[in-house]
Image (tube, rainbow, N blue to C red):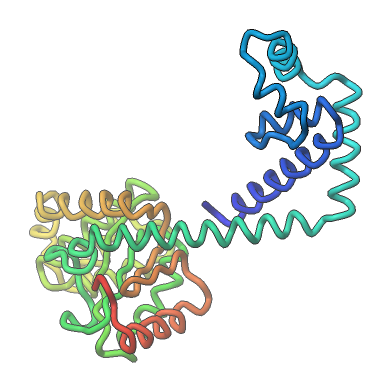
Amino acid sequence: MTRAARRLTGIRLAFTAAIVVASAGLGAGGLIAADRAGHPAAGSGVQLAQAAPTNSPAAAATAGALSSPFDASQKAAIEAIIKEYLLTHPELMLDVQAALEERMEKIQAEKLKTALADNASEIFRSPDAPIAGNPSGDIPVVEFFDYNCGYCKRAFTDIAKLIEVDPKIKLVLKELPILSKASEEAARVALAAKKQGKYWEVHRALLTVRGEVNEQSSLRAAEKVGLDITKLKKDMASDEVTGEIERVRDLARKMGIQGTPHFLVGDRAIPGAPGNLLDQIRGHAADLRKNGCSVC
């Protein structure tokens, strides 16, 4: 869930809370709202209704009341109370939003922990995944990316700097062409270049191309770094290249990754390309070297 979606949900929850508060002051209307919200209101009327036999007149009357909608005067009263309550206590929305975000972060952290444990081998040790930096490095940094993703292009400067300043980083690159057909064409060129030992050179070239990266522009970049284009085109259509793209897409689905770039530093996630990406990665790496990684 995005921050904007959590904010909207928080406001809705605050609004719902206000309805319950307002309804609680409307007698039978309050009982109706509270019952429908799954929180029976306190009061002898509810207790008696719950205790009465299902075929008794009291039960029938209660059922009729509970199934009746609010009338116009009750609706107007609820709206007035809600407005007054929220204007008097606007901090309620912020409190609900903060609580929701904290809960969602905990949920996402648990989901990530489970997903990492279930897919650790494919994430960190896939034999077909391109590797840059130190293949035997002590800290794995995994990047899911798309060559037509502007944020991926922006992040590349930090990633290139990372493997330059930290010789113990193992950079695992996950081709995730999700933006267009052209993105898959570029991914196929890069993965085919791996078979000629030039993956990083082509990868770097494609992430610095201006405009759309497609098969034509990717082949031009590959030619500039000295690849055999005839062999490259053949390898682009190979089962090995197709299989790697499909495996990464499946892995992204399992991990709940819906956008690029997405980074994993050991068991820590960094979605997107924050302005301090390099500092965040190096900070996580230092912490992992100190405390270890449970799944790497």
Question: Residue placed at 17% from the left, 80% from the top?
Answer: 135
Residue 56 falls in image quadrant: top right
Q: Nearer the viewer, residue 289 or 212?
A: 289
Q: Is residue 102 left or right of residue 85?
A: left
User: What number of labels is visible?
Assistant: 0
Q: Identify the residue shown where x is 87% and y is 43%.
A: 83
Left or right of 102, for residue 133: left
**Compared to 52, does 98 lie above or below?**
below
Give whichever of 224, 153 is nearer the camera.
153
* Quarter of the image with the C terminus in it: bottom left
Front residue of 14/277: it is: 14
The x and y percentages for residue 176 are 31, 56
* Residue 227 spot, x, y in % from top left: 14, 68
The answer to whether residue 255 is above or below residue 80 is below
Residue at 29% x, 82% y is 292
Indicate whether 71 appears above or below 10.
above
Front position in the image: 19 or 204: 19
Give the residue at x 41% y 52%.
Answer: 258
Whole-percent x, y for residue 54 in the image: 62, 13
Q: Which image quarter: residue 43? A: top right
Relative to 134, say whether 176 is above or below: above
